[in-house]
Amino acid sequence: MCSRAVSAGIRGSPGVDWRRHYDQLTYTPLPVPPEIAKGVRAYLDTFGLIFGAFDFGLDRDGGWHWYECNPNGQWAWFPDHITAPITRAISDHLQHGAPA
């Protein structure tokens, strides 16, 4: 199973639904806190998944709040600096398989 967690912050929406304001958004790679990575890994393992696009919201204090896991989530619409690590992780898994 792939063990890499990649996260992107989406900022700049003037409203709650950021999908209405693509032209105003910025995308920033975010470090995934160890406890979040551990929880994501446990979720994937429980459901036998090797990939999941997890949606989180961050509060004003930096706390992560989980919304959902999309086991076939879309990510290729992000800019290259966000998609490159995801593409590498999936490609590595396809080429080398799960680590022993």
Image: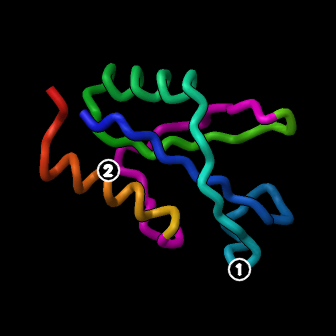
**Which of the two discs, 1 and 2, labels the residue nearer the N terminus?**
1
Read off the residue under disc 1.
Answer: 23
- In the picture, the quarter occupied by the N terminus is top left
Q: Name the residue at 60% across, 42% down.
A: 31
Read off the residue under disc 2.
Answer: 89
Magenta-colored stretch includes residue 15: no
Camera-nearest residue between 23 and 96 = 96
Q: Amino acid at mark 2?
A: Ala
Looking at the image, what colour scheme do you see?
A: rainbow
Camera-nearest residue between 33 and 13 = 33
Secondary structure at badge 2 equals helix
Q: Name the residue at 57% across, 37% down.
A: 32
Can you give x and y, in whole percent of width and height, for residue 80 in the image? 48, 71
Secondary structure at badge 1 equals helix
Q: Name the residue at 22% across, 51% down.
A: 92
Vertically, is 38 above or below 51?
A: above
Can you give x and y, in whole percent of width and height, for residue 30 in the image? 62, 48
- In the picture, the quarter occupied by the C terminus is top left
Looking at the rendering, the stretch of residues picked out in magenta corresponds to: 62-80
Vertically, is 71 above or below 15?
A: above
- Whole-angstrom CA distance, mark 1 to mark 2, is 28 Å
